[in-house]
Each structure stands twice: as structure tokens, then as C-alpha cells.
Image (cartoon, helix red, strand yellow):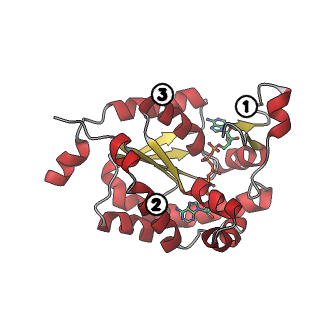
């Protein structure tokens, strides 16, 4: 019997560590990482119609309209690499409508992971975050400083990582996250994300290892 590839959703407030954990999960499990934030930022930098539409919402810490994001995700999920390697959805679904769109297409994960981190830490993490445009690696000025001067010189900040914008992103998260969770209550795993990166990863890794092969097929068959 051929093993079905893993399907994972990861959620959590801004800067709860989703991107950081996803890099580690991808390295170990080879899943296709689909981050709606990354997809939207790529649209914004390319100056596409979608990007121009999304920019204003993102700059205000608001959710981009459901249909725009859902179309992007569904199109990415239908690519052959995703079917072959499995998927890791990061930052989607983020509203009741988004969750229902996936449900109506019978797209369900094997597990839904939520990273829990206190608000004060989230703000500090966002404001101190720096990104490497070459490797995509995520740094933090205090927690994870760059390895050398060369990397340090090319790091940049996200435009929505200012104190005010983080506060509004956090507010948006709080308004919407509760509406998504009931859809995945049977698959929900809330994890304390306020611990060292490796410790958080270890817990996620143990959960992923417990997922039986063909878990999704079993569920559909019931
Ligand atoms: P998105 O890009 O998804 O942003 P977000 O949810 O705010 O999450 P972040 O990327 O800020 O944080 P993260 O959890 O990945 O943390 P990271 O690992 O980088 O979305 C951006 C915008 O796009 C939204 O506001 C919205 O407008 C739009 N959008 C996206 N999806 C959408 C959707 N589905 N529908 C509608 N609109 C959508 O870590 C953060 C920092 O903390 C780093 O510096 C890192 O080094 C540090 N860190 C990580 N882990 C730890 C740890 N364990 N201990 C200490 N420091 C840590």
C-alpha cells in the first residue's frame, strides 16, 4: 500500500513562530510549505493586480479578502508536487469562510497545530525580526542574531513589523482565530510556543510521527 503524504496546518498569532517551525518541518518531512503571507508578499513585490489589491489590507494588519487568498491556496494545492510530497499550510485558513471553502472541497489536514505565545513576547518578536532575502532565513536582533557581518548587512524588516501594525495584526488574529478552531476541533493540538525553537519543534515532530500512514484516507472512508 502506498503511504499518503502528510497534510499539516499550522496556525498562531503574528510572530508565534509559524515560519520558523515550518522551515524545520520542511527540512525533516519534505512537505510543500504554503504560506499565504509569503504568497501575498510575492504578489505585492511583483506589482500584480492581486498584490496591489492585497497591499492595503496587509499594511493595515487586516485580512486580505477571503476569495483572493482562497483562489491562491487552492491553485497551489492542485500542483503535482503537493500531491506527491504532502502539504504544510501556514497562515491559512484564517477565517470561518476560508475553513469552509476547504471543507467544501474535502480538503482536510491530518493535524491542526496552534502555537500559543503571550502577547508581550509577540510584539517583541515582530519588532526584532529580520529576514535574509538570500536564504529566506528568519532572524531576530536579540534571540537569533545573524551569523556574520555579510548576512547582517543584507537583512531587512517586514513593512508590517512596526509596533502599531503588529498591534492591529494581533487584534485581527484574535477576532478571527476562534471562528476557525471548531472546524478542526478533532485535529487540534495547542502547543506552548514560548519555549526554545528546538523544544517547540521536538513537540511538533513527536505529534507528526504519531500520525498513522494513510490517516486522511481512513477518515474519508468513515
Ligand atoms: P503572515 O505572513 O502569515 O504573518 P503573521 O501571521 O502575522 O505571522 P508572521 O509571519 O509575522 O510570524 P510567524 O508566526 O511566521 O513567526 P516567525 O517564525 O517569523 O501574514 C501577513 C499578512 O498577510 C496578514 O496580516 C494578512 O494581511 C495577510 N494574510 C496572510 N494570510 C492570510 C489569509 N489566510 N487570509 C487573509 N489575509 C492573509 O517568528 C517571528 C520572530 O520570532 C522571528 O524573529 C523569530 O526569529 C522569532 N522566534 C520564532 N520562534 C521563536 C521562539 N521559539 N523563541 C524566541 N523567538 C522566536
Asked whether, in this view, residue 117 is left or right of residue 105, the answer is right
Q: Is residue 112 visible?
A: no
Residue 189's mark?
none
**Helix, strand, or loop for circle 3?**
helix
Residue labelled with disc 1: 144
**Element under label 2?**
helix
- Residue 132: x percent and y percent? 73, 39
Residue at position x 36%, y 63% in the image = 102
Q: Position of residue 24 (x, y in %)?
A: 53, 33
Residue 47 picture location, percent across and down = 69, 66
> Is the CB–ligand 1 distance for label 2 below 8 Å?
yes
Q: In the rendered image, is residue 187 in sight?
A: yes
Give the secondary structure at mark 1: loop
Q: Quadrant of residue 40?
A: bottom right
- Local packing at callout 1 (Cα closer than 10 Å; few below 14, some 14-19, many 20+) is few
x 37%, y 68%: residue: 100
Is the C-beta of the residue carrying label 1 under 8 Å from the nearest atom of ligand 1? Answer: yes
| Label 3 – label 1 distance at C-alpha | 19 Å
Position of residue 101 in the picture relative to residue 177 (left or right)? left
- Viewer-proximal residue among 182 and 63: 63
Q: Which residue is tagged 3?
A: 202
| Left or right for 142, reference 114 | right
Q: Which sits earlier in the primary sequence, circle 2 or circle 3?
A: 2
Q: Earlier in the sequence, mark 3 or mark 1?
A: 1
Question: Considering depth in this image, is 134 or 213 the residue closer to the camera?
Answer: 134
Question: Which quadrant of the view contains residue 164?
Answer: bottom right
Residue at numbered disc 2: 73
Amino acid at each position: 500500500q502506498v503511504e499518503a503524504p502528510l497534510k499539516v496546518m499550522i496556525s498562531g498569532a503574528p510572530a508565534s513562530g509559524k515560519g520558523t517551525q515550518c522551515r524545520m518541518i520542511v527540512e525533516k518531512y519534505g512537505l510543500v510549505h504554503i504560506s499565504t503571507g509569503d504568497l501575498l508578499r510575492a504578489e505585492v513585490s511583483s506589482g500584480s493586480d492581486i498584490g496591489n489589491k492585497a497591499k492595503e489590507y496587509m499594511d493595515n494588519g487586516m485580512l486580505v479578502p477571503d476569495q483572493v487568498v482562497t483562489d491562491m491556496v487552492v491553485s497551489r494545492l492542485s500542483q503535482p508536487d503537493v500531491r506527491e510530497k504532502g502539504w504544510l499550510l501556514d497562515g491559512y485558513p484564517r477565517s470561518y469562510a476560508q475553513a469552509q471553502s476547504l471543507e467544501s472541497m474535502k480538503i482536510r489536514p491530518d493535524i491542526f497545530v496552534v502555537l500559543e505565545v503571550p502577547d508581550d513576547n509577540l510584539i517583541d518578536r515582530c519588532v526584532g525580526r529580520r529576514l535574509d532575502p538570500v536564504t529566506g532565513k528568519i532572524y531576530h536582533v536579540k534571540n537569533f542574531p545573524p551569523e556574520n557581518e555579510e548576512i547582517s548587512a543584507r537583512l531587512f524588516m517586514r513593512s508590517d513589523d512596526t509596533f502599531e501594525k503588529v498591534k492591529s495584526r494581533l487584534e485581527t488574529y484574535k477576532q478571527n482565530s476562534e471562528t476557525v478552531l471548531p472546524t478542526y476541533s478533532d485535529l487540534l493540538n495547542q502547543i506552548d510556543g514560548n519555549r526554545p525553537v528546538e523544544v517547540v519543534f521536538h513537540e511538533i515532530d513527536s505529534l507528526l510521527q504519531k500520525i498513522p500512514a494513510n490517516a486522511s484516507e481512513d477518515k474519508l472512508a468513515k
